[in-house]
Amino acid sequence: MKEHCPRNYRSLLAATLAWALTTPVWAAQPPATDPVKEEVKAVLTQHDEAMDKQDTKALLALYADDPTIAMMGTGPGEFWKGKAEVETAYKEF
């Protein structure tokens, strides 16, 4: 009977250590959502939906009411400044 005691003791010790070392991971809180990130996602979703519907008014509503707004494309020369130019660009898209 004394032969089995060290083996059982080691097993019990290993199980206890595994539990103790992994408990903090189980208790960790899920990461909090970033409100700025969520707001950006919402605006991009609105933009995609407006583009799908070809709703120029909804697209322009996403821009600030400022005459100096600008939109940049992905190629050379794709730069539109002012609400009128941005609106024209969206109509061409």
Image (cartoon, rainbow, N blue to C red):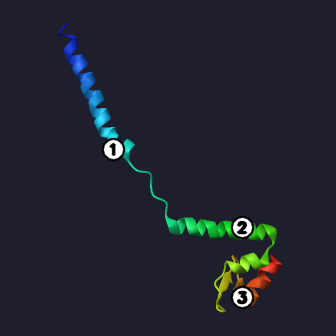
Mark 1–mark 2 contact, CB under 8 Å? no
Amino acid at the residue labelled 3? Lys
Instruction: Look at 63% across and 84% down and name the residue there.
Output: 64
- Seen from the viewer's position, the closer of residues 62 and 88 is 62
Quadrant assignment for the N terminus:
top left
Amino acid at the residue labelled 2? Asp
Which residue in the structure is indicated by mark 3? 83
Q: Please, what secondary structure does the residue beneath circle 3 have? A: helix
Q: Quadrant of residue 63?
A: bottom right
Between disc 3 and disc 1, whose residue precedes? 1
Mark 3–mark 1 contact, CB under 8 Å? no
Which residue in the structure is indicated by mark 1? 24
Residue 20 percent location from the top left of the image = 28, 37
Q: Quadrant of residue 14?
A: top left
Residue 76 percent location from the top left of the image = 70, 82
Residue 9 percent location from the top left of the image = 22, 21
Residue at the far left: name it.
2
Count residues near mark 3 (Cα–Cα under 10 Å), then give few for <14, some for 14-19, many for 20+: some
Q: Is residue 10 above or below residue 60?
A: above
Q: Is residue 79 above or below residue 33?
A: below
Q: Please, what secondary structure does the residue beneath circle 2 have? A: helix
Residue 33 percent location from the top left of the image = 49, 60
Instruction: Look at 31% across and 33% down and name the residue there.
Output: 18
Q: Is residue 17 above or below residue 48?
A: above
Badge number at residue 48:
2
Q: Please, what secondary structure does the residue beneath circle 1 have? A: helix
Count residues near mark 2 (Cα–Cα under 10 Å), then give few for <14, some for 14-19, many for 20+: few
